[in-house]
Image: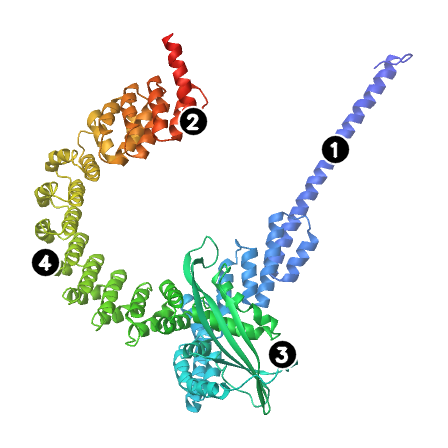
Amino acid sequence: MHFPGENMNERSIRGGYHVLFEKIVVKGLWCISLAIIILLAASCSSVESDWEEACKKNTVEAYEHFLDSHPKAPKLIIKKAYERIAWAETKQIDTPGEYLMFNNDYPESEFRDECMERLNWASARKKNTIRAYEKFISDNPMSKYTSRAKELLKEVSGKMETDWQEAVKSNSYDVYASFIRKYISEHRVFEAHNRLMLIAEKKWRTLLKKLRNINQTGKPALSSVPTDFHLVLVPRLKRLLFIQEYIRPGSLSESSQKPNLYIIYNYDRGINLGSRSSYSTTATYLRTQELWVFAKLIFSQGDTIEVIGKFTGHGGLGSRTFEDIVKNTFKKFKKLGLPKNIQGYLESIIGYSTGLYRYPGFQTRIQAYIAAYILKKAPYWSDKWEAKLLLTQIKDPDAVEPLIALLNDKEANVTARGIAAHSLANIEDNRVVEPLIAALKDKQSGVRQSAAQSLRIVKAPRAVEPLIAALKDKDSGVRMSAASSLGFIKDPQAVEPLIAALKDKQSKVRRLAAFSLGEIQDPSAVKPLIAALKDEDEKVRRSAAISLGKIRDSHAVESLIRALKDRSKIVRQAAAESMGEIKNPLAIEPLVAALKDNSSDVRKSAAEALEKLGWDSKNVNKRVILLIHKRNWDECIKIGEPAVKPLIATLKDKDRKVRRGVAYALGEIKDPRAVEPLIMALKDKDFGVRSEAAISLGQIKDPRAIEPLIAALKETKYLHEAVLSLKEITGKDFDSYPQWYNWWKKRQKQDNQ
């Protein structure tokens, strides 16, 4: 830039200053940038070195110091530091709850495996039971805590055995009750409970006799009852006593130091409430009854003993869950002013007694013992239903012993023992096999049958010979179950006995024998099964035909071809299906003939078999015929115009479902040739066919359909599909027959003019 009065020398000097200034600025900026880079590098180096140092020390203090020194460190490192601090604190507290919380907060943690191991170990230590330590050792054989678990297992086992010997020696109600409370999850509990019950029953009868004639002499307020009293629960029924002494062992004990509050209680079931959800309106529906609970409260202090109140509770109606039924029953109890724990005791005993509670907090073995007892003793169908439901859902090996005991209980009814057999089959445990095999020789045929059915699920090879022997049982139900189970086990040594069973006098046994031979798929069964195609019972012939298809032996083809003319459609259908499995070309011609069978099911099976045999798959006409008989309407629609003629011919099929499908397909193809046949279909005896025909005519939009559709409105009073189709064809918006009829008459007059 030139300034006035400025000479050239002055201008050149000023320009030099500018250039020099620019160089200085650029050089300064470069230096500043370099310094920033050096500082950042130094900072990063400092973060990394400090992080490595903190990791070497691996203490809470070291990680906290790192976080204080580098608040702006990379997020990943900060997250890692907080995780390690949390892990160190979790290990220090060392409780199951803390490990669970850490696992939830850091699901992808590097310490996840160690956390789970420590969680299992902390849980075992907290329970401090034989079963807890045994489970830990079984699940964590390579853990560093396993040796310590074995030491504690030995210690707890020794302590339990010592306590058990003392309990047996004292043989007293209170000592057995104390043992059950202390070792509720151990294997000795059942034996302790049995011994306790022998004493408890005598004590219970004495208490009932003592309290029977106590009358209400006054109305002392419950609020005046001292809070420091001793509670004695006295059920009116022995079966309630059995459950009470599992849930609240020692509840019959009286105190000589404190006042005693006796609660004599009972329950009854009322009207059938029908199906009611167990947890929500969308859960599995189960059956139940309303519940009534009765209780009498007797207070004893010194020489004074009197009734201070009676209680009647009612639950069920309006209850959404099973738990609510019990809790609603005890709503009045709160108004009595008694401590909440008393209500809780009675709620739990009644809840478990009725089967309405799912026994939370109890090991599976005790659940099974209680449910088995209810199944045997409860007079109410709903209680038995709940007990049955529980037993059949249990898959824990802990339930094996109670279920075996119920299966072998000769005093239990056949239904209860049968449920035990089926429940055992649901548990994967080798111990279930022998009791089920032994039950095959039970005096009760129902038990033998249940055992045979259960062995089908277990599929144990050592059950084959006992099941073969059961094929000769005098009860046909047992023979049926044995024949069926042998098919599921699929052992070849059962083939000959099953062949012999094809001549059993009961057709159901013959049918299941034929089925099982097909499951085993032994070629030696082909000839006997061919002979069974002539059995007098159609279901036996059907099973034989199906089994021949499973074995896939070509020697059976000629016999199956003859079976295509059997008088029973289910036999003809099975024969067609089996020829599709064998895939012998000799079957093509008979199967083509079967496409004209009176039964659409037979035609469908024949078409599927021909397709498997590759019958002229490239010939469009033949392919359409197969698709029609297979009822594959979508593929017919894809073929389009070539499928119209065969579809129209099928519109008169005897099967209404076929006619419906044909009408639908013709509407989708939209070929004008289908209009007249579809108009005829508007008079079909099946409403579904008429409906599909009306819809299809609307899709084709041919004016020839207007008058027949209006007539259809009159004949069927109001056919919604016909109205929609008329709107599609005409563009008019009428809803009733008179409107359409009047419009059509006016149009005809106009056309005639």
**What SS does tag 1 mark?**
helix
User: What's the distance in space between the residues labelled 4 and 2, CA to CA?
Assistant: 66 Å
Q: Residue 146, relative to residue 617: is it above or below?
A: below
Which mark is drawn over residue 736? 2
Q: Residue at x 76, y 27 (%)?
A: 23
User: What's the distance in space between the residues labelled 1 and 4, CA to CA?
Assistant: 106 Å
User: What's the distance in space between the residues labelled 1 and 2, CA to CA?
Assistant: 89 Å
Amino acid tagged 2: Ser
Pointer 1 with pointer 3, Cβ within 8 A? no
Q: Nearer the viewer, residue 425 or 56?
A: 425
User: Which is in the foreground here, disc 1 or disc 3?
Assistant: 3
Horizontal side of 477 relative to 392 (left or right) equals left
Percent position (x, y) of residue 168?
A: 41, 88
Residue neighbourhood size for the residue with mark 4, other residues' Cα within 10 Å, grouped as few (<14), some (14–19), many (≥20): some
Amino acid tagged 1: Leu
User: Which is in the foreground here, disc 1 or disc 4?
Assistant: 4
* Residue designated by label 3: 222
Which mark is drawn over residue 503? 4
Residue 366 occupies which quadrant of the picture? Answer: bottom left
User: Which is in the foreground here, disc 4 or disc 2?
Assistant: 2
